[in-house]
Structure formats: structure tokens, C-alpha cells
Amino acid sequence: MRHVSSAFLVASLAAIATASTTCSVDNKCPESAPCCYNGVCGVGSSCLGSCDPLMSYSLDSCTPEPICKNQTYSFSNLDDSILWDQYLGNSSQYEWTTSGFPKVENGSLMLTMPNQTTGSLVTLNNYIWYGKVSAKIKSSRGGGVVTGFILMSDVKDEIDFEFVGYNLSSVQTDFYFQGVENWTNEVNAAVSPGDTFSEWHTYTIDWTPEKLEWLVDGVVMRTLTKNSTLNATSGVYMYPQTPSRLQMSLWPSGLTTAGQGTIEWGGGLVDWNSEDIVKYGYYYALYKEITVECYNPPEGTTVKGDKSYIYTSDTGLSDQILVSGNSTVLYNLKDTGLNMTAGKQTTASSSSGTSNYESSSGADATSTGFSAGSTSKNAASSSFSDRVTQGSFLAALTAVIFSLL
């Protein structure tokens, strides 16, 4: 069985924004486009969150990562968010980056997946290097529809809660070390009373240097110890251990272009004529009361400031992370971590307003009980129909990614 995480959406977006030069550990980016962003080389946005220092031209090609911040997040609007490709690295100005079709509904963050699109992704810009992260979530539903609440590092350490829409009685827990695939890491956790779609439940990741716990409604459902992940051959603990960003996502595993294992894992092909598509014009998932509690860096960590995390070795291991005072902000979207102030200083553009969120069936979303809500002030500058077209294009790009699975 083979499936992918919410990073697939970012990878599709990266393919739009950057040149086609690909990158890997064995094929690093050129100095002219030094930042490896989900397998594609580029500059600007490619050098920020999800820039992999191990595949880039050099470790300092990617910008430093904004340090963890204790915070409780609520949603009355998306004014503190920005489109992923306009973000310059200033996490004190914009706490979230977005792509796809997020909005706010009755004080909750709503991720939507309109007909024939690849859904939505909202990412916290401050990284978490060990800590406790919680949210109340109502997942989406339907075969081939996946809701995510995960921690993802730039070197692809990953900690997951994933909801596959055909099974509303449990949530999948999973973890990865530097993207290494081991499908025995996936374990289901029962959710009750009610189900993951119709009832609010609290999902918590409690991550320390020695132990990782997944909790549902305050009850520990799974525990992973670092010691249990030792690879006897390499002597490396295959344990998530590098600074990570919170990602919340809604995406389609059930595309006709997906690998058969991915389709089966997600419960079959997406029904683009489902009850939610007909009634609202989109699949949806809801998030609220998101909290982040930061833990101290591991014992022995070198601390030279309080602004950012930096990789100092191509091992990508926890003991080679430096806490620094270095800036995380690019002057413009042509700069890179190699020279973050090379060009003329600009600010991220923004515009106000809301999208009209008409459903593809022709029904007005406001007539169904869901209003148009508040959209990202940058996303709102595009019409809904334009964004659906973009989503269809992203689906086509995603087909390329899935063909490699």
C-alpha cells in the first residue's frame, strides 16, 4: 500500500511557480536556483517553509526557520494568513500560509475541496521543535477524501493524524523519519462517541525528544518511544526529531491518476456527485481551538539566539540543529537563503474582500446553512471560478506526482 500526505498539494503548487529542475539528495540544486522545494529547484518562496536543506545547493540555501511560539489560535477571519507564494518569511506578520480554498465559518477554520480540485492546505509559519499541539476537528467524509492534521519538517520527518473519509469511526496515526516509507508505522485509533465527521473531538500530538503520544479527547491512544525506532544497521534512531510545521489539509486520494495502493487506502475514487458536493459545492473539514505549547530544545542544543532554527549538518538529525538569532525574512521573492537581502525590499501584497463561493451545481452556498465566510485577504483577490480552474490544473500536476508512486 502506498499513500501520500498533504505535501502533495504543495508539490503541485511548487511545480507551477518554479523551473522544472528537479532535486534529490544525490542531485542537489544549482546555485542559480538553490532551494529544493518538494523536489523542484527555485528561489523566493521555494527557500521558505518546506525547503529541504539536504537537497538544496547548500544547507544555507533555505532560509532559517521561525522558532516555536506558544499560542492559542481562533478564527474570526483569515487576516493573519497569506497565500503561500506571497509569503516572505515574516511569521510575526502572517501566522499562516494558505493554498486552495480555506475560509472561516462560525468561528472555525473550514478547509474546502470544490468539485474537481485538489483541496486546501493551511500551514503554521512558526516551526515546532518538540511540543504539544491540539485542535478540535470535524473531518470530511466520503471515499477518497482525506483530512489531515500533521507535523512536517523540512527534511520530511512527519507525525500524522489522518482521517480517511470512508471510515468515520477511527483516525489513522502515523510517523515518518526523513520520508522513509514504512507502512507498519500506521495504526488506527478509535474515535467515540459519535464519529469524526458529525462530532467535535480533540486530537493532540505530544512530542518530546524521547517519546511521542497521540491523544483523542485527552486519552492516550498510542505511544512511540525513540528507543524503539533504532535502526541496528545504521545506528540511527528513525524517530521524528527536526523542527516541524503544523499542516491542516483536505485533499483527494481517490483520483483516477493515483496509484492503486493510494486509491485503495483512501477508500476508492472520490464521488464528485456526493451529498456534500451537490448541497454545498465542496467537501469540507472544520478546525477550531488550535493550541501550540512549545517544549525546550533537547539537552545539549547550541543556542545563539531566539529567532530561528538552522541545520548545521547534512545528517538532518536533531543534534545538529542550532537555535539562532538569524532573520527568517527575505527582502523579495527572488532572494534566497544565500543572500536574503540581495534585491530591493518589498512587502507581501494583499487585498480585501470575499469570494462568492458558488457551488458547481449552481446552488448558492448561503442557502444551505453555510455562508461564504471570510477568505484569505490575498486569496480573495481571485474569483472563485478562476481558483477552481487553478485547482483543476493542480489536479493535473498531481497526476504526475501520483504516477511516481
Image (tube, rainbow, N blue to C red):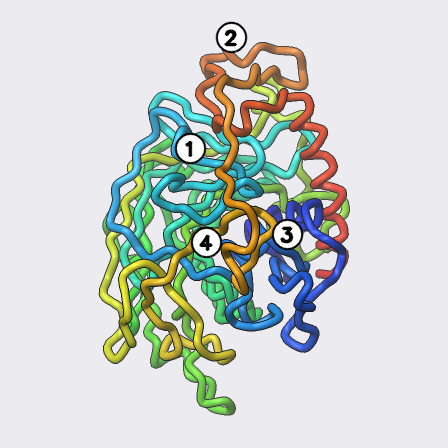
Q: Residue at x 25, y 80 (%)?
A: 300
Res 3 → quadrant: bottom right
Res 254 → quadrant: top right
Alpha carbons under labels 1 and 2: distance apart = 19 Å
Residue 279 locus on image (x, y percent): 57, 17
Residue 137's place in the image compared with 379, above or below, is: below
Name the residue carrying label 4.
172
Q: Which mark is residue 11?
A: 3
Q: Nearer the viewer, mark 3 or mark 1?
A: 3
Q: Residue at x 41, y 59 (%)?
A: 65
Q: Which mark is residue 219?
A: none
Q: Earlier in the sequence, mark 4 or mark 3?
A: 3
- Say few, some or many: other residues with alpha carbon within 10 Å of mark 2 (under 14 / 14 to 19 / 20 or more): few
Residue 396 locus on image (x, y percent): 76, 42
Residue 187's place in the image compared with 282, above or below, is: below
Element carrying mark 2 = helix
Q: Nearer the viewer, mark 2 or mark 3?
A: 3
Alpha carbons under labels 4 and 3: distance apart = 23 Å
Quarter of the image where the N terminus is located: bottom right
Task: Please name whichever residue, 268 or 28, is drawn nearer the observer in this view of the structure.
Answer: 28
Amino acid bearing label 3: Ala
Amino acid bearing label 2: Ser
Q: Earlier in the sequence, mark 3 or mark 1?
A: 3
Task: Please name whichever residue, 305 or 74, is drawn nearer the observer in this view of the structure.
Answer: 305
Name the residue carrying label 2.
367
